[in-house]
Image (cartoon, coloured by chain):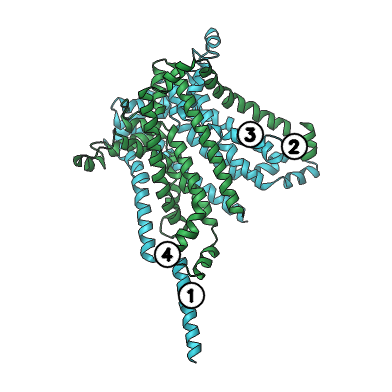
Chain colours: A cyan, B green
Amino acid sequence: MAAAISTTLSHHTSHAAVQRATHDPKWVRWTLTGIALLFLACFLALPLAAVFAEALRRGFGAYFSAFAESDALASIRLTLLAAAISVPANLVFGVAAAWCIAKFNFPGKSVLITLIDLPFAVSPVISGLIYVLVFGLQGWWGAWLMEHDLKVIFAVPGIVLATTFVTFPFVARELIPLMQAQGSDEELAALTLGANGWQIFWRVTVPNIKWGLLYGIILCNARAMGEFGAVSVVSGHIRGETNTMPLHVEILYNEYNFVGAFAVASALALLAIVTLVLKTLVEWRHAQARKS
Amino acid sequence: MSFLRRERSVLPGFGLSLGFTLFYLGLIVLIPLSAAFIKTAGMSWDEFVAAVWSPRVIASYRLSFLASFAAASVNAVFGLLVAWVLVRYPFPGKRIVDALVDLPFALPTAVAGIALTAIYSKNGWVGQWLEPHGLKIAYTEIGVFLALTFIGLPFVVRTLQPVLEELEPELEEAAASLGANRWQTVTRVILPELLPPLITGFALAFARALGEYGSVVFISGNMPMRTEITPLLIITKLEQYDYHGATALAVVMLVASFCLLLVINLLQKWSRRYYRV
């Protein structure tokens, strides 16, 4: 009897010891969670709140009048235009790159993957500078462009090019690992059933990668609309002509028109919030689709 | 290339997709990037050294490097904490907090820059409490450090999170049944497992901070020799039509970030091998 009690006891204590060693005590959990949340509140929530607070400092009238200005509207149009060109271009590229990397074997594949990631390693300022070196007045094709009365730098084409450069890897780097993990079995099955290349792509591949595709597009678009450094170098800051929304924010801010600057900034912050919500939804749907 | 296709895969579209990929990569990325190196190759050695090693430039390297290093270190510590809390502890609103971690990726850098400046300047929410005590943040090196901490924040969290999620509970149970207490389990079993992704996240945050421009220019005040980061110096030289000087600096930064990219790739390979075993 005594032996039985002692084994139960020792079993009990060892279980408690394992519990102690694999689970954190309550006070540790609470302290760590508290510090983490405080850190995130100071570094993330505070700046986000500050944008809206500063924008609404003089009330809604002043807030909305910032958007009524023709320069602000022009900057919104240009931002939308730059995203409308660069995102689809990088989308087509991303799909093509993922198709050849995931479905085929060829020498130099890992080098190609590294090169696709290259724009992420380049400072935004340098991303703008290299286009100035190619298309600027002093650049390779500057004289030729002058002769034909074409403007790339300090004009819309330069802004589109710089935006395309900084958003270059987004879609490709989402799709490559996804398509590599999925393999080619379904496409091969479609092929043996007599489907041609485009049928395979549209009816088999696209439905399989749609969530990854959407995810890449969302991130690519957010960066395209928000890019500042690269676009700032090639834009020339001509009001109403070559200012995107982030550049318009800078100009208003430097003119001490803080309400106007933060009002336009708040539109960009809203875009960021929408991006985060969509991203979370897509992640959730993607996880659901993978489970089923 | 046709022999490769026959050998490896019967799927169509290899030539078209690889051809387009290489064409587009060359047009958008490789040719423009090579322009920077070719332009610099046209400079004499003395010109190059004068452009990239003057006292003002060295001061900017110092600030860029030290502020990025400090910011990435803070991100490593707090990123580890945030990732741990997000993966291990339940609390209300977790999904929102998790989504918010990506804010620095989604928020345009110029918006982050003016927001941080507004908070930490003399009349701002935080600045008004700190400046009377002699602690100036906006328009000082500390401001640069804060902005770089903001933009580097998601890197460590997002590299650690998947590793922490896949860490098997058996590992900790085994340590416990061998007599380890919680502190020993964490420091001797869990932390060593997390070291490779932690270093990778640190390197990613550091690399991003080195090149950052938009969030820093507003809060730094841009005083030569004191709060001028290297990317800003490139812009300054461009505005003075000193294309050679700007390009030479750009090449120094490009070489530095390519070296970092190489290190990061090796680190990722190392940590992947670490987990397969």
Percent x, y of residue A256: 28, 27
- How busy is the neighbourhood of tag 2: few (under 14 within 10 Å), some, or many (20 plus)? some
The amino acid sitting under disc 2 is: Gly
For residue A112, the mark is 3
User: Gap in Å between the C-alphas at discs 3 and 2?
Assistant: 24 Å
The amino acid sitting under disc 4 is: Asp
Question: What kind of element bears circle 4?
Answer: loop
User: Gap in Å between the C-alphas at discs 4 and 3?
Assistant: 45 Å
Query: Which of the 4 quarters of the picture holds residue B170?
Result: bottom right
For residue A24, the mark is 4
User: Gap in Å between the C-alphas at discs 2 and 1?
Assistant: 60 Å
Q: On screen, A205 above or below A79? A: below
Residue drawn where x is 41% and y is 45% of the image? B75
Q: Which residue is mark 2?
A: A197
* Of callouts 2 and 4, the N-terminal one: 4
Percent x, y of residue B262: 55, 37
